[in-house]
Image (cartoon, coloured by chain):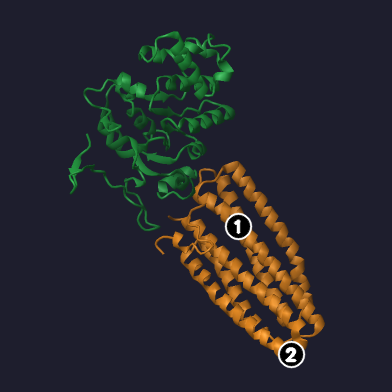
Chain colours: A orange, B green
């Protein structure tokens, strides 16, 4: 079934739905920027940029709350059903994932500040770059799939999370080896590990967003490995 | 009678028209065939290929639907879609309309509703009806409920009638409000109480099926909530078909929802499916308030 959110008899309802979708996508844009900045701050030992990431966090939180309030009002006033209901639910669920991604970006920014103070550690940065690129692409593709109601693209993006998880495990093994070889590096490498962990979590949240694209368009709940709930795929 | 075939074991098996499943996602399902689950295993009412005409005009086109035992089926759709006409076929209320013609197979417990030998008076006792506007008789509350059992010969002695009246009013959730004023006119009650009185009147003759035609559209939200609560309780003992313009009401009270559009039964599905993920785009357009 095609998705049309601009054909309600009530024009105000069209505008309300359009508006929460736009709010969520704007929030998504901010969060994607935040992740990029956090990774750059880490790679370039740029504590100024890291501070900026931490600062934006408050704005993201504020937007999540505003979006929730807006969605609550739509439910109270319109009692949305079918695709409208799924739109409202998916937007609020995604906002929550975006806020968590913002939290992870902030953690990375904090690691960046800590690592800058200790002097740079080249150990593990290649892995961070690699995984960061993968999860940033996932996040952008997930939001893009939502904008276009594109289930095929959401499913393809969702599948990329497996590779991210594998790369993360490989990186962890490698970093453990570094730490065994050079125990003096342990505290710095642990900071790198935490950052990797945050990136891996961002991948999981991007995957959740893809699942919400499927829920919105097909009405199928495929979370927690229930991909079989999506028929004809 | 249903068309019958014999299977290998010689067992008679009713031939059921196949419900058309939704085909691939994204296709325009413009065909006027019922999508979803119009049939069930324990059908109390079974309707097959029902067509209804008012003179030359056809109001219902080829509708097939089962209503299961102890099930509440909600019928929704825009004004003039035929949902009330279809409901009124189920106890032959359409017989009273000049020029109305009903074709197709309709059965109650596998007995034809439109059989030549069917007497509509006992039929309507088995299949009771509650209307949009509460319409108590201009009699006392007691007599409103006792009238049916008396004329149907279900009870004649005062003690028996007392028991039926109390039971019916209790089941309709009205007893505590009226037990001290049973001799007062039913028309003196509030709208919501009158509607519950009408439900008590319908229950008094021990029906098997209760048809409700927009039973809450003239009631305030509190009276509506009482009736909805009552519908849920009545389901234990009765089969209920309800026509409603309130989508939220259909979502709250029914197990399956049937969506009618221009005299066609477009979709029948589990209520939760209809309101979260309808299979037909016309259903989706209607329940979400889009241009159909």
Q: Which residue is farthest bottom?
A: A181
Subunit of label 2: A
User: Element type at marker 1?
Assistant: helix
Q: Quadrant of residue A24?
A: bottom right
Q: Which residue is farthest right?
A: A117
Q: Is residue B103 above or below residue A203?
A: above
Position of the C terminus of chain B, as image quadrant, is top left
What residue does disc 2 label? A182
Q: Quadrant of residue A58?
A: bottom right
Q: Is residue A98 above or below residue B15?
A: below
Q: Is residue A122 above or below residue B144?
A: below
Whether residue B57 is visible here, answered yes or no, is no
Q: Is residue B276 above or below residue A93?
A: above
* Residue lying at 32% horizontally and 48% vertically, measured from the top left: B31
* Residue lying at 63% horizontally and 70% vertically, measured from the top left: A201
Q: Crowding at label 1, few (<14), some or many (≥20) Cα neighbours within 10 Å? A: some
Position of the N terminus of chain B, as image quadrant, is top left
Q: Quadrant of residue B125?
A: top left
What residue does disc 1 label? A93
Q: Position of residue B263 (x, y in %)?
A: 34, 37
The residues tagged by marks 2 and 1 sit, at their Cα atoms, a distance apart of: 43 Å
Q: Nearer the viewer, mark 2 or mark 1?
A: 2
User: Element type at marker 2?
Assistant: loop
Subunit of label 1: A
């Amino acid at each position: 079934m095609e998705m049309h959110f601009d054909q309600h008899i009530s024009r105000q309802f069209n505008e309300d739905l359009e508006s929460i979708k736009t709010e969520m996508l704007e929030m998504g844009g901010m969060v994607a920027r935040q992740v990029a900045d956090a990774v750059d701050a880490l790679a370039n030992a740029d504590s100024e940029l890291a501070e900026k990431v931490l600062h934006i966090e408050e704005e993201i939180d504020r937007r999540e709350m505003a979006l929730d309030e807006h969605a609550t009002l739509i439910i109270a006033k319109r009692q949305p059903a079918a695709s409208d209901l799924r739109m409202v639910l998916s937007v609020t669920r995604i906002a929550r994932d975006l806020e968590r991604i913002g939290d992870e970006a902030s953690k990375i920014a904090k690691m960046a500040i800590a690592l800058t103070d200790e002097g740079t550690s080249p150990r593990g940065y290649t892995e961070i770059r690699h995984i960061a690129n993968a999860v940033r692409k996932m996040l952008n593709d997930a939001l893009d799939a939502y904008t276009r109601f594109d289930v095929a693209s959401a499913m393809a993006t969702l599948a990329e999370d497996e590779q991210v998880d594998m790369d993360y495990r490989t990186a962890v093994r490698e970093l453990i080896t570094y730490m065994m070889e050079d125990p003096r590096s342990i505290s710095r490498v642990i900071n790198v590990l935490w950052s990797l962990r945050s990136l891996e979590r961002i991948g999981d949240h991007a995957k959740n967003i893809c699942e919400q694209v499927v829920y919105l368009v097909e009405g199928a709940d495929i979370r927690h490995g229930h991909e079989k709930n999506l028929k004809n795929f | 009678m249903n068309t019958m075939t014999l299977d290998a074991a010689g067992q008679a098996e009713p031939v059921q028209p196949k419900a058309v499943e939704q085909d691939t996602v994204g296709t325009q399902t413009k065909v006027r065939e019922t999508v979803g689950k119009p049939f069930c295993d324990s059908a109390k009412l079974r309707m097959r290929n029902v067509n209804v005409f008012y003179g030359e005009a056809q109001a219902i086109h080829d509708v097939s639907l089962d209503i299961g035992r102890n099930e509440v089926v909600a019928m929704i759709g825009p004004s003039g879609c035929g949902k009330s006409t279809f409901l009124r076929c189920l106890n032959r209320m359409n017989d009273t309309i000049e020029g109305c013609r009903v074709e197709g197979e309709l059965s109650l417990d596998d007995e034809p509703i439109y059989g030549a030998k069917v007497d509509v008076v006992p039929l309507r006792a088995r299949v009771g009806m509650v209307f949009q506007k509460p319409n108590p008789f201009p009699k006392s509350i007691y007599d409103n409920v006792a009238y049916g059992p008396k004329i149907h010969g279900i009870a004649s002695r005062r003690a028996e009638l007392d028991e039926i009246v109390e039971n019916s009013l209790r089941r309709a959730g009205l007893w505590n409000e009226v037990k001290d004023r049973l001799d007062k006119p039913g028309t003196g009650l509030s709208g919501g109480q009158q509607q519950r009185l009408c439900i008590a009147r319908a229950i008094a003759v021990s029906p098997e099926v209760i048809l409700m035609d927009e039973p809450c559209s003239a009631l305030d939200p509190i009276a509506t909530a009482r009736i909805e609560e009552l519908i849920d309780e009545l389901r234990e003992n009765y089969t209920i078909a309800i026509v409603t313009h309130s989508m939220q009401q259909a979502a709250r009270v029914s197990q399956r929802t049937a969506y009618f559009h221009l005299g066609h039964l477009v979709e029948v599905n589990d209520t939760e499916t209809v309101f979260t993920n309808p299979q037909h785009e016309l259903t989706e357009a209607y329940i979400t308030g889009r241009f159909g």
